[in-house]
Image: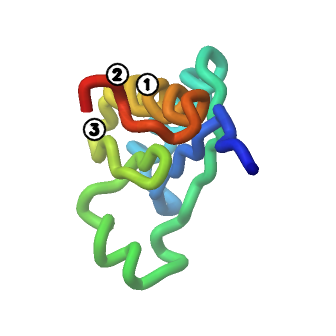
Amino acid sequence: MATASPRPEVVLYSRPGCHLCAVAKQMLYALGRTIPFDLREVNIESDPDLEKRFLLEIPVVEVAGEVVSTAPIDLDRVRQAVNEARMRAVRGGAPPLGG
């Protein structure tokens, strides 16, 4: 039986030339030095549906498949979501306690 990785995937939806996106990326790199996660950046211009969905909200951060923050990025919320995703992976996907 495969076990979920304790390194959740964090996706940064952005686009070229977006200053706020560049700042968000640096914030996520800094966070990643203290909490392990896999960062993937997605250019919304590569997909018309993503562009339509996120154009007015970028940067957008998704953790383990759930959008947790849009511009301006709430790094505390991202940190909390990454920690929750890591704990779920360690517990084998069980829901959070009390939830």
Point out the tag, 3 or 1, that comes first from the N-terminus. Answer: 3
Of 84 and 30, which appears nearest the observer? 84
The image shows residue 76 at horizontal and vertical percentages of: 34, 22
- Residue 12's place in the image compared with 90, above or below, is below
Of 90 and 80, which appears nearest the observer? 90
The image shows residue 69 at horizontal and vertical percentages of: 31, 42
- Marks 3 and 2 in Cβ contact (< 8 Å): no
Of 53 and 1, which appears nearest the observer? 1
Which residue occupies the extreme top position in the image? 34
Secondary structure at badge 1 equals: helix
Which residue sits at x=29%, y=46%?
70
Which residue sits at x=46%, y=57%?
13
Which residue sits at x=48%, y=80%?
47
- Residue 88's place in the image compared with 80, above or below, is below
Dot 3 corresponds to which residue? 72
Which residue sits at x=65%, y=26%?
36
Dot 1 corresponds to which residue? 79
- Marks 2 and 1 in Cβ contact (< 8 Å): yes
Task: Determine the image quadrant of residue 99.
Answer: top left
Q: Is residue 59 in view from this perspective?
A: no
| Disc 2 crowd, CA 10 A, few/some/many (<14, 14-19, 20+) | few
The image shows residue 52 at horizontal and vertical percentages of: 30, 77
Amino acid under label 2? Asp
- In the drawing, what numbered circle is on residue 76? 2
Amino acid under label 1? Arg
Task: Determine the image quadrant of residue 86.
Answer: top right
Secondary structure at badge 2 equals: helix
Please name the colour scheme applied to the rendered image: rainbow
The image shows residue 21 at horizontal and vertical percentages of: 45, 47
